[in-house]
Amino acid sequence: MRAVMQSAAMPQVPLWIDGRTQPASAQRFGEVFDPARGAAIRLTPLCEAQDVELAVSAAARAFPAWRDTPPLRRARILMRFRELLEADKEALARLVTEEHGKTLDDALGSVIRGIEVVEFAMGIPHLLKGEFAENVGGGVDCVSLRQPLGVCAGITPFNFPVMVPLWMFPVALACGNTFVLKPSEKVPSASLRMAELLHEAGLPPGVFNVLHGDRVVVDALLNHPLVKAVSFVGSTPVARHVYETGTRAGKRVQALGGAKNHAVVLPDADMEFTADALIGAAYGSAGERCMAISAVVAVGAAGDALIEKLKAKASAIRVGPGNAPGVGMGPVISAPHRARVAGYIDQGVKAGAEPVLDGRGLRVEGAEQGFFLGPTLFDRVRPEMAIYRDEIFGPLLVVLRAATLAEAIALVNANPYGNGTAIFTRDGAAARRFQNEIEVGMVGINVPIPVPMAFFSFGGWKASLFGDTHVHGPEGVRFYTRGKVVTTRWPESAAAAPGLDMPTLG
Ligand code: NAD
């Protein structure tokens, strides 16, 4: 992001520290765009280390009292927060559409998927229950429990301004941690709104804080001694940096990275159903989803039938501003990103892939300055081509051909990413083999975007996730807590003599 100077004409997004908005000490600012108009609408302060100090120390001060707040009380605050989110969900969706560009319906869907994580976290009194064993030794009992870590940080990407932060902080707060969120500088406003709603729900000051900025803030959080755990979602190079820097500084880190998600289509699949599913998965949110399908592997005769249908359906997508009625696909996030995706289309043509649909020439009437690209489809793409190898994160779908299911599985497994994948077939045995052999964290069977519900955990494999635990669901609770085992004896009389050997039951 280009750093710009402060301007009196442009509103600034504030920070949220210690239960109130605060101006940043920043001298550098990033521009937030309305991608449908191609116009800057507000400025994000790019915070410095002193802002990080303020937020982290507020969170550290708030930790002891929040940790000692009974889980049921914490859950009740989350219940109120859930009601406020529910009442505010359309306004939040409008904010997402304004700064990200996706359609209002899509934005609303993502807000609802985020609210579901709050609903999961409301069950925290049950989720935190430990184990107890009586008489592990003579007159000795043992209890295992999970306790919060302290100050946790979340660093989130531009493509889900509400949902991805909600993957993290409701679970972290429910477990008794305090939190510092650093949303993407491209979409800063929704995080502020959620901070206000948490405050209104009764969350004590300092328990939840929001900072803005770029690498400077992230690195300061990664190196701050009071930050105990970091959850990151974003691109693979940054995820790797966050994981390596955070773990070197002794922190617990989960860093979710980029993706290249494949759909394998067998010749026996219902092609109409499959094509509809793939259109949504490839072009929804202009392809800017970490679970978007960006590569189709068509097995045997599936290819020709599928290409015809995909071409017809993709050509029918109405592209325009996300808040306009009837629009199926909005703009991409920024002018440089539009140029990057268009550059990949150039490369695909030069590399000899067959362009079936080329979105570069699209003009949206009345929104000529918007960052629009039409749906793009390439056939007969080969694995060595850049349009297949790289995560492009735009409305670009590539189709590769494979002779057999085994060849298709080998191709998917050879890819460095392993976030999501799907198979389309009517053959249960083929689906079962795929589910068993595929090296990917989230698998759909006739389900194009298999995003786990909030009470399961979300996460990919290989270059799509660094760390051991996935987000939300049971693994989220594990990530934001650490285990303790207490062994107890209440002797009725003093022991006869000191024992120097390892105690055993004998
Ligand atoms: P990004 O990696 O550019 O930015 C993510 C966050 O990291 C932002 O908050 C940003 O400010 C910060 N950041 C950027 N560069 C940094 C640097 N050099 N050092 C430290 N921090 C830095 O990602 P993005 O463009 O905002 O989001 C798109 C990416 O996120 C795609 O790769 C997409 O696949 C991925 N993503 C993954 C998931 C998942 O669950 N695996 C979910 C959503 C998005």
Image: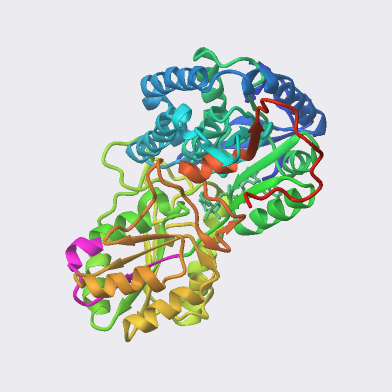
| Residue at image location 44% in from the left, 45% down from the top | 368
Q: Which residues are magenta?
A: 261-275
Residue 342 vertical placement versus 494 (above, below): below
231 or 189, which is in the foreground?
231
Residue 97 coordinates in the image, percent (x, y): 43, 36
Q: Is residue 159 visible?
A: no
Query: Which residue is outermost to the front?
Result: 496
Does 43 appear above or below 439?
above
Q: Is residue 262 magenta?
A: yes
- Quarter of the rendering occupied by the N terminus: top right
Q: Relative to residue 481, is residue 391 depicted above or below?
A: below
Q: Outermost residue toward the bottom?
A: 403
Tell me where residue 50 sits by quadrant: top right
Please report the residue visible at 50 percent of the width from the left and 58 percent of the height from the top: 460
Say which residue appears at 69% left-offset and 21% top-offset.
64
Magenta stretch encompasses residue 461: no
Residue 185 image offset from top left, x and y in percent: 63, 38
- What is the quadrant of residue 402 in the picture? bottom left
Residue situated in front as seen by the camera: 140 or 279:
140
